[in-house]
Amino acid sequence: MYISYKEIIVETKKEPLLSPIMCWFLFAMVLANIAGQMSPILMPIYLTELGVSVGQVGIVFTISSIAILILHLSQRIECSVIVIY
């Protein structure tokens, strides 16, 4: 009445969870996200290397933040075009 382990365990070849193409795609996406996250961190260093003062670096980030806010608000109120003069 004993059932041996050899009878219970049937060897089946399992397919990998991700195909090799998907592994490469995942790796590329990780690298792209790392590079995207490094950009805001390195921007002040790059600007100061170009000879920009600390105050001007602050103005650059302030203007970019205001531009992002305006674009976000334009999507929220469903404006098709916003022209800034």
Image: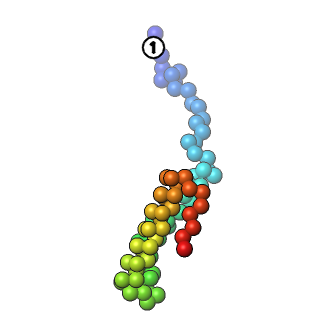
Residue 40 appears at what percent x and percent y?
Answer: 44, 70
Residue 49 appears at what percent x and percent y?
Answer: 44, 86
Point out the residue furthest to the top here. 1
Instruction: Please tell me which residue lies in front, 82 or 14.
Output: 82
Looking at the rendering, which quadrant does residue 16 occupy? top right
Looking at the rendering, which quadrant does residue 46 occupy? bottom left
> From what the image shows, is residue 4 above or below residue 14?
above
> From what the image shows, is residue 19 above or below residue 70?
above
Residue 11 appears at what percent x and percent y?
Answer: 57, 30
Q: Quadrant of the C terminus?
A: bottom right
Question: Does the image show residue 83?
Answer: yes
Residue 63 appears at what percent x and percent y?
Answer: 44, 73
Instruction: Please tell me which residue lies in front, 81 or 33.
Output: 81
Instruction: Please tell me which residue lies in front, 37 or 7.
Output: 37
| Residue at position x 60%, y 35% in the image | 13
Q: Amino acid at mark 1?
A: Tyr
| Residue at position x 51%, y 22% in the image | 8
Structural crowding at the residue carrying mark 1, measured as other residues with C-alpha within 10 Å and reported as few (<14), some (14–19) or many (≥20):
few
Point out the residue furthest to the right here. 21
Question: Does the image show residue 33?
Answer: no
Instruction: Please tell me which residue lies in front, 18 or 30.
Output: 30
| Residue at position x 45%, y 62% in the image | 69
Mark 1 = which residue?
2
> From what the image shows, is residue 70 above or below residue 25?
below
